[in-house]
Amino acid sequence: MVIRTLGMDDLKGPLLSVTPVAYDATFVPEGVPAHPLRLPRDAHMARAPAGLVLASARAKHEVVLHRPEAAWVAATLAWPVTAETAVAALPLPHAVVHDVLGYLVAAGMAVPAEGERAGAGVAPDSWWLTAVPPAPYRRTPRAGTAVRAHRVTAATPTRGRCGWRPPGCGR
């Protein structure tokens, strides 16, 4: 068994590790395709002592995300995203985002997004990357915008004394 590891030259440890879980698993990073990618539908993430483990029932590898930078890149795959959209959305060097995506594609953790619009959920102004959520989640509209009616649920971010935070998250 060969465990492939991707790291940076900053001596803070590896970004991610790819471990085979099937006997016939082959791992060949070939770069990032130009078409939109997303996580497999049955992908799940779990905590482990070494970091977050990203796995799928159909994949022949599992990926351990050792550092937050790798987890940020993997999180962009929750929506259909191209490599260039992910690079624009994350405060990471271009090469790091492309290398992490290349490893995720080779491990089977980034699959083609079938019939979904690229960048629909990821943009540099996405609410999970900034302090101000987009209009459907805001309680007060920006100047010059129409008020959008929406149902407030337990998962809807609310305005707290420290900015926009999910309910129950206090400081």
Image (spheres, helix red, strand yellow):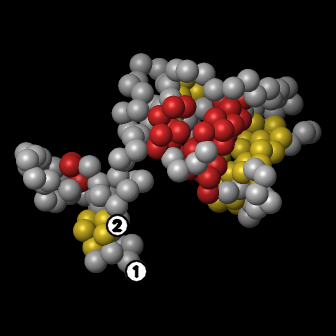
Quadrant, the N terminus: top right
Residue type highlighted by circle 1: Arg
Report x, y in % for residue 127: 35, 52
| Residue lying at the far bottom of the rendered structure | 171
User: Is residue 45 visible from the viewing direction of this image?
Assistant: no
Q: Secondary structure at mark 1?
A: loop
| Horizontal side of residue 112 vs 80, given as left or right | right
| Horizontal side of residue 41 vs 132, given as left or right | right
Disc 2 from disc 1: Cα separation: 10 Å
Q: Residue beneath label 1, please?
A: 171
* 30 and 38: which is toward the camera: 30
The residue under the point 71% across, 56% down is 66
Which circle marks residue 50 in the picture? none
Report x, y in % for residue 78: 48, 40
The residue under the point 54% across, 31% down is 83
| Residue lying at the far right of the rendered structure | 1
Quadrant of residue 63 in the image? Answer: top right
Count residues near mark 1 (Cα–Cα under 10 Å), then give few for <14, some for 14-19, many for 20+: few
Quadrant of residue 43 in the image? Answer: top right
- Looking at the image, do the residues carrying marks 2 and 1 touch, with CB atoms under 8 Å apart? yes
Q: Is residue 50 above or below residue 160?
A: above
Q: Earlier in the sequence, mark 2 or mark 1?
A: 2
Which circle marks residue 165 in the picture? 2
Residue type highlighted by circle 2: Arg
Report x, y in % for residue 52: 66, 55
The residue under the point 58% across, 27% down is 111
Q: Is residue 107 above or below residue 171?
A: above
* 88 and 170: which is toward the camera: 88
Q: Secondary structure at mark 2?
A: strand
User: Is residue 88 visible from the viewing direction of this image?
Assistant: yes
Quadrant, the C terminus: bottom left
Count residues near mark 2 (Cα–Cα under 10 Å), then give few for <14, some for 14-19, many for 20+: some
